[in-house]
Image: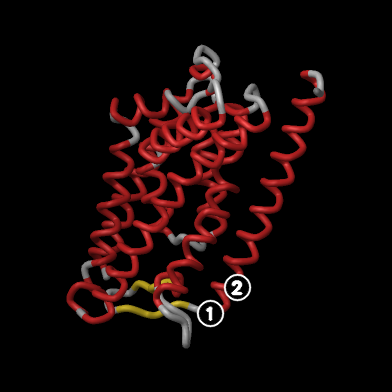
Amino acid sequence: MPDEPQRRHAFAGVSALLFVGSAAVTVAWCRSMAEMGEVAMPGGWTLSMAWMPMCGQSWAAAAASFIGMWVVMMVAMMLPSLAPLLWRHRPMAAVAAGAGYFFVWTALGAMIFALGAAFAEAAMRVPSLARVVPSTLALVVLLAGVFQFSTYKARHVAHCRPVTQLHCATPANTLAALGYGARLGLHCSIACAGLTTILLVIGVMDLRAMAVIAAAITAERLAPHGERVAWAIGGVSIMTGVYLMGQAAWR
């Protein structure tokens, strides 16, 4: 059985390869989707093709494609803050915990696609609905910023910080590790609700937005004063929401 330094080096190597691979696939997917263009909508905004089936593609295939890429994207975005939570576990326990964690994100991706596809369909059918989208999305960004200051978010973020998990017992077996990962994924998905919403509003295929949101999530969990980071992000989000509302009003 490998000693502790070897185990840590192996874990770091596998995590780095997984991050690089998922990031590369995400970049390739975003570029391919960008080449397909977007649909101009009433109200001066554009609808991403990520929410609609390609030519000849069924809704089931479109959902499977979106969910698959969503999971890959989440691996790239969440792994930097997840890896420090798993490094102290045994290899099989770490794998099981990671599986449980990303199962939660997979389920969330399925719900997001269902809601996004329904919204896209409605917006394309009802022009009056499409026209209020810019102001509505601006309000969503503003509210997401307010969420950053909530004690509800702070409680869930606390479960996702390595300094907190150091005081928790490691899972006794693979099944316990799977449950641990699922609980961690639930806490993380709730803590990231505001930032995930902002990503969806800005554009799920926007690589710059992904990078900024991933950096914000990682900083909230790993920075010495993560709550201050969350507040700073909230302040920027609120100002961005106000700015977008002003833009929507002038259209």
Q: What residue would you read off at disc 2?
A: 32
Whether tag 2 and tag 1 are in contact, CB under 8 A, the answer is: yes
Q: Position of residue 154 (x, y in %)?
A: 36, 26
Q: In the rendering, which numbered label is found on residue 36?
A: 1
In the structure shown, which secondary structural element does the residue marked by tag 1 occupy?
A: loop
In the image, what residue occupies the spot 56% across and 31% down? 174
Indicate left or right for 154 with 65 as reference: left
Residue type at mark 1: give it. Answer: Met
In the image, what residue occupies the spot 48% across and 65% down? 66
Indicate left or right for 73 with 132 as reference: right
Residue type at mark 2: give it. Answer: Ser
Q: Position of residue 48 (x, y in %)?
A: 43, 71
Q: Quadrant of the N terminus?
A: top right
Q: Residue furthest left?
A: 128
Indicate left or right for 79 with 213 as reference: right
Up the image or down, 65 lies above or below 156; here it is below
Up the image or down, 28 lies above or below 244; here it is below
In the image, what residue occupies the spot 23% across and 63% down? 249
Indicate left or right for 234 with 42 as reference: right
Q: CA distance from mark 2 to mark 1?
A: 7 Å
Q: How is the image coloured?
A: secondary structure
Q: Quadrant of the C terminus?
A: bottom left
In the structure shown, which secondary structural element does the residue marked by tag 2 occupy?
A: helix
Q: How many marks?
A: 2
- Mark 2 burial class by Cα count in 10 Å: few <14, some 14-19, many 20+: few
Q: Residue furthest bottom?
A: 56
In the image, what residue occupies the spot 23% across and 81% down? 125
